[in-house]
Amino acid sequence: MSGSPIAPLKPMPIIRTTQTIRYFQGVPIMTISTNTEALNATALATRAIHAGQEPDPTTGAVVTPIYMTSTFKQDGVGGLRNGYDYSRSINPTRNSFDEQLAAVEGAKYALSFSSGLAAIDVLLRSTLKPGDNILLGNDVYGGTYRLLSKVFVPWGIGLDVVDITDTAAVSAALAKKQYAYIWVETPSNPLLNITDIAATAAVAHAHGTKVVVDNTFASPVLQHPLADGADVVVYSTTKYIGGHSDVVGGAVVLNDKETRDAVAFLQNAAGAVPSPFDSWLDIRGLKTLDLRVKQHSRNAMKVAQWLETRPEVERVWYPGLESHPGHDIAARQMHGGFGGMISIQIAAGFEAAKKFAGATEVFTLAESLGGVESLIEHPGAMTHASVAGTTLEVPANLIRLSVGLEDADDLIADLEQAFRQI
């Protein structure tokens, strides 16, 4: 089956950003302010290449340097040069990536972290207190569920699970209890469920609840949650933003200054920061994100259409297919493609699924996703083992594919030979 026409990209008023330093409780805080003169009318691909990437003032180097330093010389006691004192608090390479990501996302602020889970942890610890509640979607990354259920629940945070794709169910839950946040993954991991961000945000805001969207699967190329009403966007930059399976990182992106300051303060206090080299890898990855994600999407669509014809496959989960229950929402909400992630259920069951996952030759059996190389995994035994026995448990016969940038016909041929082995 072919996908429906993709909705055109909605224009967004963004973003040439500049950096200033101010102090919050004695800690230097990078503030990103808007200056739309240079990049306001440019496309996302242009902003990704140029935002935050001023040539080095000393040498004229076009590429942002890796400022691999722990500390900075001061011109007298307290005489900081442009606010720089210590790389846990502030580093030019990290600042460059934060500015670049904010511009691409269409946001006022972006803060990068040492991992996606570090970003989530700092966001929640800096804005919640014991007694607050989170409403969680019923299909999320296993690491997110582990963090919430094993760390935040013992700390005193209430956690409830709902079918986040059902706006009526979300509304009913909000009517019964006050929630600080609704946590949305769309497309979700690993079942690729689609949530209407605008509808969810409207319901949430009517009840005084904020919406956090984990946009890792879609990336800022395909989906813009802030423009659709979300309050905060989080990323594992390890995935599509980094894009080469060689960096671990995360990010929080938002427009609210008070929340941004709280997150930045705890990030500095706890030291949840990426290294300058990791920031540089994310800068490099973000510059080619537009090209890569669109090709990931084209490859995944071709592979998903082929998988729907296979007798070995019980079900294909891919939002670009008309058979997907969230396809119409995805076609309206996502722009330029439907992403590179596919999940399938193997008709012959659990053992056949495990055998299939280990039989590929081009697809690599590994966790993670979003890199240039194609990956295959068994979520129940790998990325989502931590949700076994809970309401978020995934089907035992489920296989998740991260479709890379190889030739799509080669990927199909590899899957075909793997099917022959089960």
Image (spheres, rainbow, N blue to C red):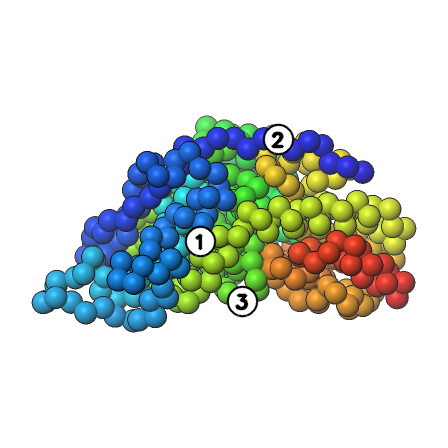
**Helix, strand or loop for disc 2:** loop
Answer above or below: position of 74 versus 392: below
Q: Is residue 319 left or right of residue 128?
A: right
Quadrant where the image shows the C terminus: bottom right
Question: Disc 2 marks which residue?
Answer: 7
Question: Disc 3 marks which residue?
Answer: 246
Residue 401 position within the rendered picture, expressed as x and y whole percent measured from the top left: 71, 56
Which residue occupies 59% across, 43% down? 186
Q: CA distance from mark 1 to mark 2?
A: 27 Å
Amino acid type of the residue that numbered disc 1 sits on in the rendered structure:
Ala
Question: Which of disc 2 and disc 1 is earlier in sequence?
Answer: 2
**Helix, strand or loop for disc 3:** loop
Residue 281 position within the rendered picture, expressed as x and y whole percent measured from the top left: 46, 62
Q: Is residue 147 left or right of residue 86?
A: right
Amino acid type of the residue that numbered disc 3 sits on in the rendered structure:
Asp
**Helix, strand or loop for disc 1:** strand
Q: CA distance from mark 2 to mark 3?
A: 33 Å
Question: Disc 1 marks which residue?
Answer: 251
Q: Residues within 10 Å of mark 3 (few under 14, many from 20)?
A: few
Question: Which of disc 3 and disc 2 is earlier in sequence?
Answer: 2
Answer above or below: position of 354 versus 224: below
Residue 418 position within the rendered picture, expressed as x and y whole percent measured from the top left: 84, 63
Q: Residues within 10 Å of mark 2 (few under 14, many from 20)?
A: some
